[in-house]
Amino acid sequence: MTKKVFMNTMGCQMNVYDSTRILDALAILGYEETQKPEEADLLMVNTCYIREKAADKVFSCLGRFQEIKQERKKKGQETLIAVAGCVVQALGDAFLKKAHSVDIAVGPQSYHKLPELITQFNRKNGRKTIAEFTSIEKFDALAQPTSHGCTAFLAIQEGCDNFCSYCVVPYTRGCEYSRSAEAVLNEARALVDTGAKEIMLLGQNVDCWHGEGLDGKTWHLAQLIERLAEMDGLLRIRYTTSYPVDITDEMIAAHRDIPKLMPYIHLPIQAGSDKVLKEMNRRYCVAQYLEVVEKLRKARPDIAISSDFIVGFPGETDSDFEQTLAVVDKVRYAQSYSFKYSPRPGTPASLMKNQVPEAIKTERLSILQAKLLELQKSYNQTFVGKNLPVLLTERGKQKGQLNGYSPYLQNVHVSLPEDRLGDIVTLHISAATASSLSGETI
């Protein structure tokens, strides 16, 4: 008998990838995904711990799950509640003590054990938490994935050795681990064979990937992308997230020389003040960051650059914030993500004495986001009147509308029939907003 699973994914793109792999693993037990939680035999949330607000959302979600479980019980229907991800890794067994409604909890390196845990639970072996760092075992244990559309995520590297003073990733994802080129290429082949035309390579520090190559030697990211580009049926390649000083000259040259590698890079700077960057334990200064930007634009003049910003880091002064705004003006980002600093338990920054008042963080974030939004709108407007190849990925909100992505990762709307989904269509861009482009077939 087919069972239903509802998945709520929170946080980063790595979590989105993990959720697809969890669904693949659960298929072994006969679970099929549903978008309706009230009909699910298994309610799952894949959690994020990167900011306090993200962690709070987990317990709000679990409250809703518990209500659904109680309503289903009245109808004689059994329901399991499971939690995966970084919140479990951070809290360990204490998570189940706090989340009384949860039956099973697994960290981000242990979700391959979910089928076993569910089977054990159904045999009345009790609630269970597993939070281990077992990246190698996880990837080896999972079967090859099936693509769920024409775009797909593929994790090639996990964990982080940088220990930025504000970040929980080294504590929730563990130290850096790179998968072998053979494993990555096999997974990419499986994704392409089941419909993927674009693959986004994922890693907490994706440029640090250094897996065993097909020749037995250590390969680096540029070599891997060069080999992926030879794969028939794979039309577009992207990667994220990059750490500025880990980008090699070979990787920069790849943007120049490999047509399938899209002209877009996510290059977080976090702050525009050298003093703040040092306190963050980032391994670069502003001048080094700008040098990387210059090299990228020299190699690929049309490359779109996005970034992350943290506003109100402990000790950030008005002058430090103005320096961040100056970097934004200089680089002129195509897209960006910005957040108020959020203290995470166990990180060095959470213990710093000179915390910035919440009101000041809110004001600075508002100023920064207004500038970033205006730049994004200005960037998008430069494409009005131009032709762009757009990969159509999903149905739009309007009837008869499809959405897709340009090479520069802009969201593009067009009126076309659904049978064009998965096609790359050249569109004439007729309008632009800060968040999207509108196009017409030529």
Image: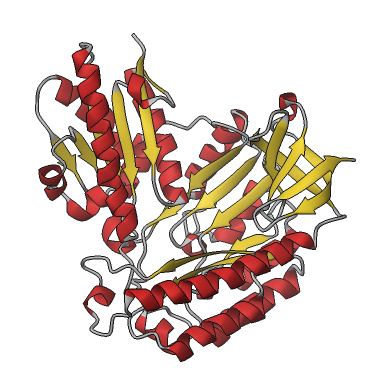
Residue 175 sits above or below residue 32 on the image: below
- Colour scheme shown: secondary structure
- Taking the spot 21% from the left edge, 77% from the top edge, the residue there is 351
Q: Percent from the top left, x then y, of residue 229?
A: 68, 48
Q: Percent from the top left, x then y, of residue 64?
A: 28, 34
Instruction: Tell me the quadrant of the picture where the C terminus can be found.
Output: top right
Q: Nearer the viewer, residue 275 or 342?
A: 342
Residue 119 sits above or below residue 259 on the image: above
Q: Percent from the top left, x then y, of residue 61?
A: 30, 40
Residue 241 sits above or below residue 8 on the image: below
Q: Percent from the top left, x then y, of residue 272?
A: 51, 82
- Taking the spot 24% from the left edge, 29% from the top edge, the residue there is 67
- Taking the spot 19% from the left edge, 35% from the top edge, the residue there is 102
Residue 5 position by quadrant: top left
Q: Is residue 375 left or right of residue 220?
A: right
Q: Is residue 210 left or right of residue 50?
A: right
Residue 174 sits above or below residue 65 on the image: below
Q: Nearer the viewer, residue 12 or 66?
A: 66
Q: Is residue 30 left or right of residue 388?
A: left
State whether residue 110 appears in this view: no
Q: Nearer the viewer, residue 190 or 130?
A: 130
Residue lying at the far top in this picture: please name it.
1
Residue 59 position by quadrant: top left
Residue lying at the far right in this picture: please name it.
442
